[in-house]
Amino acid sequence: MRCPVPTRTAIDFAKRKRLSEIALIISIIILISGIAAFALQIARPNFDKEYDAHHSQMEAIETGEVNTHLNNLMNQNTAEIESVTGMGLDAAAAQKALKALEDSLKNAQETANKITLALAEEEQSFDGPFMFMARHRMLILATGVILLVISLLFYIANNKTSKICLSIVRDKWLYVLLMPGLIYFVIFKYLPMWGVVIAFQEYVPYSGIFGSEWVGFNQFIRFFHTPMLKKLFVNTLLLSFMNLVLYFPAPIFLSLLLNEMRRERYKKLVQTFLYVPHFISIVIVVSITYVIFDSDGLIGRLSTSLLGKKIDFLTDPGVFRWMIVGQSIWKETGWGTIIFLAALTNVDVQLYEAAMVDGAGRMRQMWHITLPAIRSTIVLLLILRMGSVLDTGYDHLILMSNAMNREVSQTFDVFVYEQGINSADYSYATAVGLFKSVISVTLVITSNKIAHALGEPGLY
């Protein structure tokens, strides 16, 4: 029995597939090399400055500046020797003066030779593949990213039996609909991430990202030694804890109450009124708060008449956090019920009918049927909420803060705004923001692991 001979088309396809795999491997190696070059840059933050100084010195030697200086010194010493000879000194004094001048010229020559040898030895420290990668890290990283994208497309195009390719061909119109959102996230979410590199620099807008001095982790060390670190942590965590305990359950309770309404027209009317505060600007909300809680406002006068003393809600540090949480609950609770009400639509009505036959009342139906039905949604939103524990927002707090409550209004977001916008310390502000983001990602991953351990599907 003769073995089947592969056709030319099959051979060409196999070659293209092998070439695409090789190109993919090469692009990954180049990309890893660029990342390693950045790691080397972090380990040696003054590399660029050292290399520039060394390069300038080597150029001075190559252009003959040192030799020119030696020639000038030699000519000067020769002139001095001739002048000593013409002074008419006795032989011993003239010989001594000539000896001193010759020693000076010899020492200068030896010093020049030592400088040349030292620079030659230093040149070796800047040689080698790792130093080359560090000097051209941006080019290597950009080349790796471009080649990776091209090789991935080439690999998918030449691997028609892969699940990815089959999925793209089968659902091509869904991917076309995906493109606008994907382009939006790439341009406005992922590409700006490149700007976090200034957290490791002493960024100067005039010099730009590529021209600013690399300082490694100096900005983070500076932040960890700031006296405000403890206050920032305490204020941020207290406000986030209050939001987590008071604000997060509010949409759940409200959606359960709305779900118990039986008159649809009245339910839709209530939902409409609950959604309206979400569309009101936080500036308007703060203005309303100032009008109502001012000492001459409605709540201010009422508290004075009931308690017999004046309470300044807007300047009292102990009331500040409660005001912030209360405004958030009033503004966003109604809007937060949308996702829970959508989850409640998937609950089988027959479960309620069976519970009623068994004699379960409204509260037992809510506890044993409604809440378990939206438990996975609650866990998912709780995991996402953990990612924003350190994210308190700056606009709301800045609008509500004043000289009297500034001690409790200073959070990470306000600190980043003040350092980055008011003080124009962009690298420091970026370092603080990056630190906050790393903590948030860690909390999301940890919360997701805990959810899996408890038997919930989690975020991913």
Image (spheres, rainbow, N blue to C red):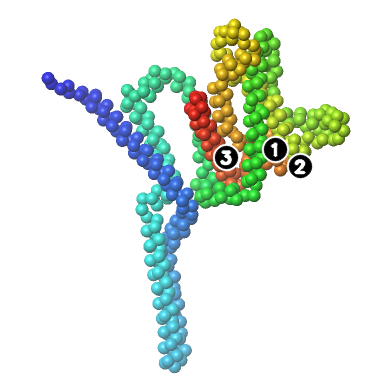
* Contact check, label 3 and label 2, Cβ < 8 Å: no
Instruction: Identify the image quadrant of residue 144.
Output: top left
Q: Position of residue 243 (x, y in %)?
A: 65, 31
Q: What amino acid is found at the position of numbered circle 1 in the picture? A: Ile
Mark 3–mark 1 distance (CA, rounded to whole Å) = 19 Å
Disc 3, SS: helix
The nearer-to-camera label among 1 and 2 is 2
Disc 2, SS: loop
> Which residue does the numbered mark 3 point to in the structure image?
436
Q: Position of residue 126 (x, y in %)?
A: 40, 56
Q: Position of residue 48 (x, y in %)?
A: 47, 53
> Which residue does the numbered mark 2 point to in the structure image?
404
Residue at image position (36%, 21%) is 166
Instruction: Identify the image quadrant of residue 363.
Output: top right
Q: Residues within 10 Å of mark 1 (few under 14, many from 20)?
A: some
Q: Which mark is residue 398?
A: 1
Q: Position of residue 6 (x, y in %)?
A: 20, 24
* Contact check, label 1 and label 2, Cβ < 8 Å: no
The nearer-to-camera label among 3 and 1 is 3
Decide which of 282, 179 is in the foreground and name it. 282
Residue at image position (58%, 16%) is 368
Whether residue 65 is visible = yes
Question: Above or below — where is 172 with respect to 394?
Answer: above
Question: Above or below — where is 11 with respect to 349?
Answer: below
What quarter of the picture does the N terminus occupy? top left
Q: Which mark is residue 149?
A: none
Disc on the earlier residue, 1 or 2: 1
Q: What amino acid is found at the position of numbered circle 3 in the picture? A: Lys
Is residue 347 rendered to the left or right of residue 138?
right
Q: What amino acid is found at the position of numbered circle 2 in the picture? A: Met
